[in-house]
Image (cartoon, grey):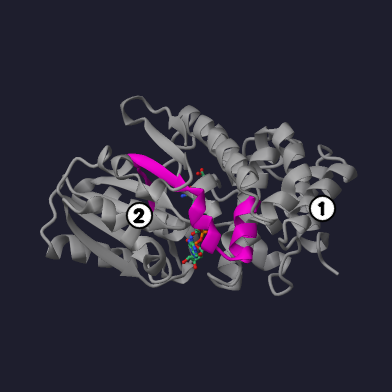
Amino acid sequence: MKKLLVELGDRSYPIYIGSALLSQTELFTRHIKSKQIVVVSNETIAPLYLDAVLKNLQDYQVETVILPDGEQFKTLDFVSQIFDKLLACKFSRNATLIALGGGVIGDMGGFAAACYQRGIAFLQIPTTLLAQVDSSVGGKTGVNHPLGKNMIGAFYQPQCVIADADLLDTLDDRQLAAGLAEVIKYGLIRDADFFVWLENNIDALLARDKPALAYAIERSCMNKAEIVAEDETETGIRATLNLGHTFGHAIETGAGYGTYLHGEAVAIGTCQAADLSRRKGWLTDADVDRIIALFKRAGLPVEPPEQIDSARFLDLMAVDKKNVDGQIRLILLQRIGLATLPVDVPQDLLKMTLNTYGRR
Ligand code: NAD
Ligand code: GLY
């Protein structure tokens, strides 16, 4: 097992990465300071892994909340079901919430933990590649609104993250590829050597080679932990984690939540951001070709959906947490391995990308 630390002073916490971690009771109990525990999961994941988690919690008062599966249920209404259970069971402020699932459950469970009685402890047990390399680390929690993705939320850090790579055995290929989009992101924004490693090892990752997956998870978490330690609440460098996300969120919202997986939308959005970075004079044609080629080899889409035209893109991109005074600001690439902070982009260049990149 590897242990990384997210260094945030007295709110620092470990990320455990390895195999067979769900059977290590001590990993759980070490981070639980209460008798009352609520485990939040969904209808797909609970039948696979809930019993394994519950086995570690035999000495506690445990309740479960099993939510429907899907991005379309990442809403305030469904977070309320968690509050309903906590209140009905008279859970106190020292209760602990365990989020067992992918990014949707992690974001919702974390947000419920942040809000219930103004904050209870929570543990992240990420079950998708995307959640293990990104969403479970760093304390961004929240839900979607019909007018914008992740628009309601809070920064709220967990007590620990338990990333058991064995759980990925039951993940389907499409979801695995979606997770790779966020893995590739780390190479692009700050780790050029990792980008090259990914070019050389993408086939092993797709074949679910265990050492390759473990290395990719660890290197991704290392990058994320360093960024979060430096800029927990995204006043600067943390925004670089949003490479491709402004385009991507527009695709997710515009196509209807759940149509594109988050990682798929990020893959397309990152290719759009790369195209725009080339127009700004930063990336070369060859860089853009390498980036698109790697996403394609990972089995990810690289072209925006036809039904979202440039006017609709601009409308959707106007609702983004990086915008200032209504001005769209984007993360772009100065080179492979170096992202910019949010930049104001000339409308004519942005429109050129929206009208031409990936349009037949
Ligand atoms: P997800 O949570 O919807 O999970 C994907 C699918 O895989 C679901 O159907 C789920 O039930 C299923 N699943 C999960 N684990 C499984 C397993 N081990 N075996 C079989 N099936 C399994 O999607 P995701 O890609 O994990 O997360 C996407 C969400 O994460 C989005 O809402 C996105 O906004 C959010 N996100 C948050 C952050 C953050 O920093 N908080 C970062 C990136 C993404
Ligand atoms: N996934 C973006 C962030 O954690 O900041």
From where the camera sits, is residue 21 visible?
Answer: yes
Query: Where residue 303 appears, x then y in whole percent?
Result: 76, 63
From where the camera sits, is residue 346 visible?
Answer: no
Q: Residue at x 27, y 39 (%)?
A: 31
Q: Which residue is mark 2?
A: 99
Disc on res. 293:
1
Q: Residue furthest right?
A: 285
Between 189 and 144, the residue placed more toward the observer is 189
Query: Where residue 298 appears, x then y in whole percent?
Result: 72, 56
Left or right of residue 182: residue 278? right
Which residues fall within the magenta stretch?
A: 153-181
Q: Is mark 2 within 8 Å of ligand 1?
A: no
Determine which quarter of the picture holds residue 107: bottom left
Between 275 and 12, the residue placed more toward the observer is 12
Q: Residue at x 56, y 66 (%)?
A: 253
Between 108 and 315, the residue placed more toward the observer is 108
Q: Residues within 10 Å of mark 1 (few under 14, many from 20)?
A: some
Disc on res. 12:
none
Q: Residues within 10 Å of mark 2 (few under 14, many from 20)?
A: many
Between 353 and 201, the residue placed more toward the observer is 201
Mark 1 residue type: Ala
Left or right of residue 281: residue 299? left
Mark 2 residue type: Ala
For marks 2 and 1, the one nearer the N-term is: 2
